[in-house]
Amino acid sequence: MDQEKKALINRLSRAEGQIRALRKTIEEEDVADCRAFITQIKAARSALKRASEQFVLHFVHKCQSLPEKDRDEQIAEALKALGSD
């Protein structure tokens, strides 16, 4: 597995762990500190944002081998999706 792919999977795994912890907290009705809970939500959202940015950078690199028209269109769509975050 290449280094970029491994790094992306690690980022997604961290976000997944944070989201599971949030879900468990809600299921067990164990929100003792609202500020800490919101901080965890923000951390999970940030981890997903970084993963999407990392994916787009990797994706753009992979697109270089596509025909020019397809490449430009796919890169533009990826950047548009990233910017709508």
Image: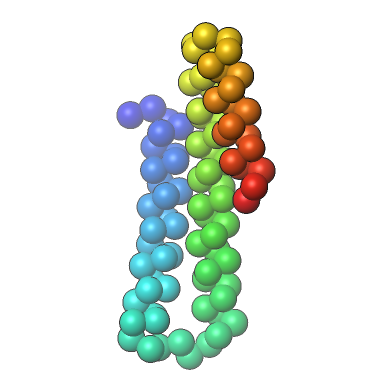
Residue 28: x and y, percent?
33, 86
State whether residue 75 is above or below residue 33. above
* Picture coordinates of residue 51, whole percent (x, y): 51, 45
Quarter of the rendering containing residue 43: bottom right
Q: Is residue 85 left or right of residue 22?
A: right
Q: Residue at x 44, y 39 (%)?
A: 7
Q: Is residue 59 above or below residue 52?
A: above
Taking the spot 33% from the left edge, 82% from the top edge, the residue there is: 27
**Rendered residue at 55%/17% (across/down):** 71
Q: Nearer the viewer, residue 64 or 37?
A: 64
Residue reaching furthest to the right: 83
If the image is split into quadrants, where does the N terminus sit?
Answer: top left
Q: Residue at x 58, y 66 (%)?
A: 42
Q: Position of residue 39 (x, y in %)?
A: 58, 73
**Scheme by which the image is coloured:** rainbow
16 or 64, nearer to the observer: 64
Q: Residue 24 location, x and y as percent?
A: 34, 77
Q: Is residue 20 above or below residue 63?
A: below
In the image, 63 versus 36, the foreground residue is: 63
Q: Nearer the viewer, residue 80 or 16?
A: 80
For residue 80, side relative to residue 45 (left or right): right
Task: Say how many tags the image has.
Answer: 0
